[in-house]
Image (cartoon, rainbow, N blue to C red):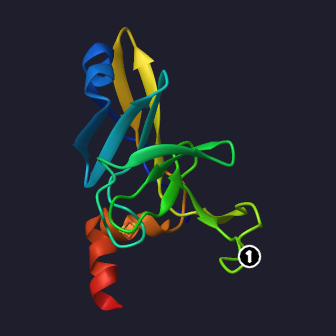
Amino acid sequence: MSEEAAVESFLVGNRKDLIEAKRTSVALGDRVVVVIHHQGVFYAMDQHCYHAGGSLLNGDIEEIDNKLCIVCPKHKYKISLAEGEGIYNASNPKDKDQPPCWMSKGIKQRVHTVTEVDGNIYVTLSVTPGWIESDYYQTEKGRAELKRV
Ligand code: FES
């Protein structure tokens, strides 16, 4: 028998208020999600950073290698807003002439789907199967797993 995750959608607020706020922290189910409005687009992702659980709520947003990324305030890890991809600078620090070389660590942060209906904004939690590293800081199951290792 396959284990299928149920799709959960939550009303998080009205469009105008969320645009004004720019960043909104919401508890959805057993997760804490940050809803971000940036350059006319809404994004939603787990609020606690996959690296060590830092809050992404006040992270700067930078364009890195043509991807909008949030920079975790705690240790400056960069995470693409749209995909939750961990992005790192793989340049050789001893070679000052080498331009920045950005690489991907793959998907590290769980991102969620944002939809708008009649001026209201909904977040549908991701049901991507398997563990994504940010899960460890979001759910009871993840916290239990962290204590175990
Ligand atoms: Fe986010 Fe370390 S907790 S970079």
The quadrant of the rendering that contains the N terminus is bottom right
Q: Position of residue 111 (x, y in %)?
A: 48, 48
Q: Is residue 20 above or below residue 89?
A: above
Q: Is residue 6 above or below residue 78?
A: above
Q: Nearer the viewer, residue 36 or 89?
A: 89
Q: Quadrant of ligand 1?
A: bottom left
- Residue highlighted by disc 1: 95
Residue closest to the far bottom: 149
The image quadrant that residue 95 belongs to is bottom right
Residue type at the position of mark 1: Asp
Q: Label 1's element?
A: loop
What residue sits 28% from the left and 74% below the top?
Answer: 143
Q: Nearer the viewer, residue 114 or 43?
A: 43
What residue sits 75% from the left and 61% below the top?
Answer: 99
Q: Position of residue 135 (x, y in %)?
A: 40, 65
Q: Residues within 10 Å of mark 1 (few under 14, many from 20)?
A: few
The quadrant of the rendering that contains the C terminus is bottom left
Residue closest to the far front: 96
Q: Is residue 89 left or right of residue 40?
A: right
The image quadrant that residue 23 belongs to is top left
Q: Position of residue 114 (x, y in %)?
A: 45, 31
Residue closest to the far right: 98
The image quadrant that residue 36 belongs to is top left
